[in-house]
Amino acid sequence: MTGKPCSLDKLRFCNRFSRELPADPITDNYCRQVSGAIFSRVQPTPVKAPALVALTDEVAELIGLSAADCDQTRLARVLSGNEILTGMDPHASVYGGHQFGHWAGQLGDGRAINLGEVLGPDDKTWTLQLKGAGATPYSRQADGRAVLRSSVREFLCSEAMYHLGVPTTRALSLVQTGDSVVRDMLYDGHAKAEPGAIVCRVAPSFVRFGHFELLAARGDLSLLETLLNFVITTDQPALGARLREGGPAERKGIYLDWFTQVCHATRDMIVHWTRVGFVHGVMNTDNMSVLGLTIDYGPYGWIDDYNPDWTPNTTDAEQRRYRFGQQAAVARWNLYQLANALYPVIQDADALQAILHTLPTSFGNARQAMMAQKLGLSHEALSHPLYGDLLDGLERLLCSQPIDMTIFYRCLIEFACQHETDADAEPGAVSLARSVAPALYPSETNGSADAHGNAVPDANNLPLFRDWEILYRQFLQIPAFNTANRRATMSAANPAFVLRNYLVQQAIDLLEQGDRTEFDTLQRLLRQPYDTLSAADKRFAARRPAWANNRAGCSMLSCSS
């Protein structure tokens, strides 16, 4: 140990995962197939000159770390893997997965190294994981490193999602390594050296659907049940107590209850993605957390102009398997794969199928309830015979021409509160359209603008705006909300600020030049995404500029990181 004593030396490591589950007996770090184990012990590869770029104080507090009493140089060493603290047990876990619908076999933590599990001040357990800390037995001939641009994106997005209220892993720190990493950003044969970086990710657990899939595919049923029992005991205390107290006859019911909870957590995560317009981009089963946390931020993006067919992933540009409007269906498909992996232990296909059969209705009902919040409607609206028509009409309107989703819903707050008492008033041809004009992008057929420089609807779309406005005003008459309640409900469901790709790319460009101004501003704004932005910050809530439409990193992204 070097440096003065600080809260780093007081971190309490419990390391349940590596203590209770079987380890790979081979300790040499080389690429290989690993069976009969859940993880391999491996040390991070030292970097040349670690420098702390950012630390999330509130995440540090979760694990009992106070940055104020730590030497920044030492903190960077620890959070880059250059210094291993007493009690840490570095390891990489092994799992498989379906990638773009196809079984990929063994995958594993190819550039993620878990430092260990820490008990926070409240005795809650958190896993610390370094992404980009070097090669592991699962790196598949890669270098195990990460570049600054992808690390900035992961660091910022993890925290942005948390403050939006979306279940997610957290980001403790961002460290530049002082090393160069060669990547081909566009996969076009133009690889170049980029600055390297490491993110420390934090979550109660990083167990994925793929952990269970790999064991089932290999027929290692004893280890499959061991992992299942461990996950239930550590992640779900109530179910864990039943598991400890009950006998073998009760286990099947407990396993089914756990799977049901995974389904519900996954559903809730996807509904939140839909609410804020987030597209994950790589919903492979190895990127699905059994806790229902958003995990592995790669080629993600927030929708700018509303388009259910949009994907941020260049690798998925042709198939669009993971497009915005398909994410709920893919989540259900992934849950089917998890059920298949659990079947050898549960041995009850009918019971598993019964749970799976509830998913379309469960997902649909959760989405409808979420949409009522976005529209400022009470729960009574869900049973209205025309509620389905209201949502269908809104979908047609949003798809009729380029309309910024985030800005549209924020504009709708003012419209709803101004028109909630005049359902029988003459709506006019463009009343709604005028209210949401700041959300409209100029279209190919209509580039005209109003007096404020906002686009106006295409003439042939005016009936869509008029008809939906008439129906929406009827729903605004349901006497359950007053103006204050409606505004509060809509403001809590519809963010004013989302971490648009082009904003992050601008921050990355400047950070690579040593200017952290935009990076720091984004860190500040993402902490209060539902607040109305100040005049000085309005540009961060504006429509995507035309120059960003096709620029690399500003719309679609590759998996190169």
Image: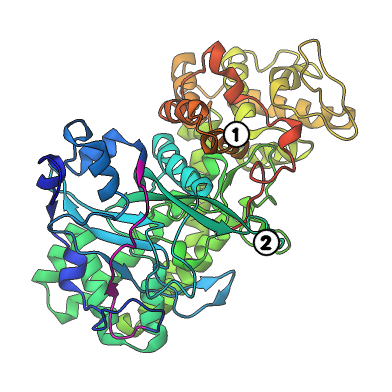
Q: Residues within 10 Å of mark 2 (few under 14, many from 20)?
A: few
Q: Is residue 92 magenta?
A: no
Q: Residues within 10 Å of mark 1 (few under 14, many from 20)?
A: some
Relative to residue 497, is residue 157 depicted above or below?
below
Relative to residue 7, is residue 492 depicted above or below?
above
Report the magenta stretch's main SS.
loop
**Mark drawn on residue 187:** 2
- Residue 501, percent across and down? 60, 40
Among all residues in the image, which is located at the extreme bottom?
Answer: 219
Q: Nearer the viewer, residue 124 or 202?
A: 202
Write the residue at 50% across / 44% down: 153
Is residue 161 something that shows in the picture? yes
Range shown magenta: 34-51
Disc 2, SS: loop
Left or right: residue 473 versus residue 467 is: left
**Quadrant housing residue 347:** bottom left
**What is the CA distance from the residue labelled 1 to the residue labelled 2?**
21 Å
Q: Nearer the viewer, residue 187 or 539?
A: 187
Q: Is residue 37 magenta?
A: yes
Is residue 239 something that shows in the picture? no
Residue behind mark 1: 506
Disc 1, SS: helix
Q: Mark 1: which amino acid?
A: Gln
- Residue 60, percent across and down? 24, 39
| For marks 1 and 2 on the same chain, the one whose residue lies earlier in the sequence | 2
Write the residue at 49% across / 14% down: 483
Q: Mark 2: which amino acid?
A: Tyr
